[in-house]
Image (cartoon, rainbow, N blue to C red):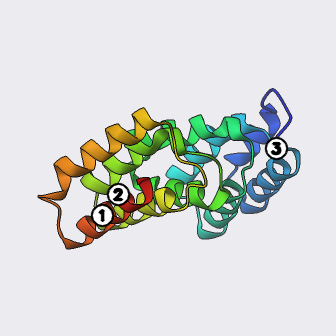
């Protein structure tokens, strides 16, 4: 992802009524890269586009490799506006392999507070972390898990115990 600004024509094409125009715009972003399109793509995904467009956007998000894109993903995960597509965003996070380790507490909170599907995806991100964050972040997360584990249901308790094992 090497461009530094958004191409207004590509942006317009993303919101075209014609599927082939939208897919062509997504392909152009894939080819040229640019992390600045991520919020636009998430807005488009959030508008519940037709299936073919949805798949193209998900494939692109799953393949993002620019480590500076982590903040865009995290802002979307934490923004309730994107709650309808939170699962898709989380799937992209573990698929693209970017380093989300410093956001461990956010994912732990999702495991604790969200429904099973979201909790599972957040757990998958934690489980696939290549690197652990610093000790302060780990300690904050461990404390949060210990506070929540006593009231967690069986599935979440399993996730939380597995996270504790990973963090040791």
Q: In the image, is residue 55 above or below residue 43?
A: below
Mark 2 lies on a secondary structure that is helix
**Marks 3 and 2, how far apart at CA:** 37 Å
Q: Is residue 42 above or below residue 130?
A: above
2 and 1 marks in contact (CB < 8 Å): yes
Q: Which residue is mark 3?
A: 33
Across and down, in percent, residue 76 comes to: 49, 41
Residue 110 lies, with reference to residue 50, above or below; the image says above
Residue annotated with mark 2 = 164
- Can residue 37 be seen? no
Pointer 3 or 2: first along the chain: 3
Image-based side of 59 in relation to 116, left or right: right
Q: Is 137 in front, or is 82?
A: 137
**Numbered circle sitting on residue 100:** none
Mark 2, Cα crowd under 10 Å, few <14 / some 14-19 / many 20+, is some
In the orientation shown, which residue stands out farthest toward the bottom? 154
Dot 1 lies on which element?
helix
Q: CA distance from mark 2 to mark 1?
A: 5 Å
Q: Which mark is residue 161?
A: 1
Which residue is depicted at the point 55% across and 44% down?
43
Q: Quadrant of the N terminus?
A: top right
Q: Nearer the viewer, residue 163 or 59?
A: 163
Q: Nearer the viewer, residue 75 or 81?
A: 75
**Cα distance between the residues tagged 3 and 1:** 38 Å
- Between 159 and 142, the one nearer to me in the picture: 142
Residue at 61%, 55% (x, y): give it: 130
């Amino acid at each position: 992802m090497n461009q530094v600004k958004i191409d207004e024509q590509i942006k317009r094409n993303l919101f075209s009524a014609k599927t082939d125009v939208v897919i062509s715009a997504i392909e152009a972003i894939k080819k040229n890269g640019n992390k600045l399109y991520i919020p636009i793509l998430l807005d488009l995904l959030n508008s519940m586009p037709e299936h073919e467009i949805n798949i193209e956007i998900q494939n692109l998000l799953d393949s993002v490799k620019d480590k500076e894109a982590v903040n865009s993903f995290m802002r979307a995960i934490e923004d309730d506006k994107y709650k309808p597509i939170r699962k898709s965003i989380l799937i992209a996070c573990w698929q693209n392999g970017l380093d989300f380790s410093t956001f461990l507490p956010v994912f732990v909170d999702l495991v604790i507070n969200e429904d099973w599907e979201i909790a599972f995806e957040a757990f998958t991100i934690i489980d696939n972390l290549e690197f652990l964050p610093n000790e302060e972040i780990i300690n904050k997360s461990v404390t949060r898990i210990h506070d929540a584990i006593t009231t967690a249901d069986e599935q979440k308790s399993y996730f939380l115990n597995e996270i504790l094992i990973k963090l040791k």
